[in-house]
Image (cartoon, grey):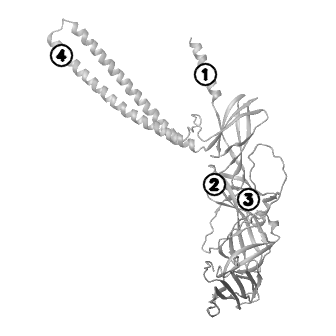
Amino acid sequence: MKKLFYLFTVGFSVVSMAQKPIFTDAKIQNATVYFNSAELTHTTNATLPKGTSEIVIKNVANYLNESTVRITAPKNVTVMSVQFTTSYISEYEIDETSPIIKRVRDSIDLVQKEIKKLQNKRTSESKTIELLDKNQVISGQNTGLSVAELTKMVDYYSTRRNTILDNIDIINEKEQKLNETLRKLNSNLQINTSKEEKTSNGKLILQVMSDIAQKADFEVSYLTQYASWQPFYDLRAESVTAPIDLMYKAQITQNTGIDWKKVKLTLSSGSPNQNNQFPTLQSWFLRYAQPITHYGYNNSDAQLNEVVVTSYSPRAKSSAASIDDYTTVTENQLNVSFDIEIPYDILSNGKQHSVSLKELKLPAVYKYYAAPRMESEAFLIAEINDYSQYNLLPGEANIIFEGMYVGKTYINPNQITEELKLSMGRDKRVSVKREKIADKSGTKFLSNYKEQTFTYDITVRNNKKEVIEMLLKDQYPLSTDKDVTIELLDKSKAEVNEETGILTWDVKLKPNEIQKFRISYKVKYPKDKIIGNL
């Protein structure tokens, strides 16, 4: 019977060991980051027994698209199922070598031993009382005892029994306190093991079958929505005669729950295909779309706000050439991707991490632009020809002109003009002023009509030491009502677009030169009407 019990116990242990999950940590190798998601690739390995087993792959993203998980395994290993979880609870997973958990477990063992000792003492005291009670019965039946002997025996019994009962009360009190301590320790153990569980992030549970016992390598890839990137640029120009030094950068944000350490990055402007159905080509029809207008930032008080990430370049000295050498740009019909050979560290903290991609020199033609009806300052514009060759994407840019940070702008390569126009910020050394001439403006009443005349003088001054070219613009109103007539009286040799009402002057200013331009127009409309935006 004992032999049968022993065989049953051993057999049960073998079955239990066969069912024990195999834990392994995934190491991230590559990350392909899109504008709104990322594809992460990990590697890991596990020692598999022959037959079926359960593998728990730890250290994957806390949030992922489970339908995009792909597992690459050796040929003689079959992956039967894959499941993602963030709350896998198992006694095997707890790190017993953790100092905090070890201290708590040691304390629990000591308290349990003390409780066992108290229980033994209480049992001994209880047995003593039983013997005393039996002795009392035996002695009471013995009629040969004298009164004095009987009195002495009763006193002894009463004193001894009371002492034992007091000892049992003390034992019970100590045991109660120890049980309360044990309860707190067990609670602390649950908290600490829960912390250990949280630090292990997401997990993939694999059910696999191996033809042989072996050490198997696995590759894991999946899509997560908690990572993104956006293009960003630094525009540097030393003067209005120098080319623009453009630093093509990426701002990467990830909050996947795992830090990316020494990871090879690929940045793509495309969108990942999560559909498992193979694609079929349909007729491709082109259609017009409304151009998207972005307004640049021109706040000179804005601060450069970047988190610089760590890269692991094999060269000791970083330079523009080294950045270009380690970044490969691939242009497809619908997207652009940047393959970066230098591994980077991107922490999972939700902050923007700046990664340098390429440095370009852009030949530029500089012009100043002013529309004093809207803004009383001049803007420096850089025009870039044949800009499609640079694979630029829409994004913000820092402007550093003549060694000074002047603000932000927006690069929009989806413009409809032949030249890419970059706003390089305001230049206060070029003065622009627009003022109404009172004696040339006024209102007249003619029968049933009201006639208003508006006259403005525009003054521009070049306070710089070099000659500048300026594109100066103003406008006069247009009418959509036959009862409202508008006449342009003075245009100061401006080029007039009668469809838009915009006047344009190409101005060339020498150092410290002042030029004036006049615009005057007359509006006639019924006097019983009010024009709200005149």
Image x and y of residue 195, in percent = 54, 43
Q: Amino acid at mark 4?
A: Lys
Per the image, the residue denoted by label 1 is 12
Q: Residues within 10 Å of mark 1 (few under 14, many from 20)?
A: few
Describe the element under mark 1 as helix, strand or loop. Answer: helix
Q: Please report contact status of discs 2 and 4: CB closer than 8 Å, yes or no.
A: no
Q: Amino acid at mark 3?
A: Ser
Give the alpha-carbon distance from disc 2 to disc 4, as whole Å: 84 Å
Give the alpha-carbon distance from disc 4 to disc 1, as whole Å: 61 Å
Q: Amino acid at mark 1?
A: Phe
Per the image, the residue denoted by label 4 is 152
First along the sequence among labels 2 and 1: 1
Q: Please report contact status of discs 2 and 1: CB closer than 8 Å, yes or no.
A: no
Describe the element under mark 4 as helix, strand or loop. Answer: helix
Foreground mark, 4 or 1? 1
Foreground mark, 2 or 4? 2
Image x and y of residue 1, in percent = 56, 11
Give the alpha-carbon distance from disc 2 to disc 3, as whole Å: 18 Å
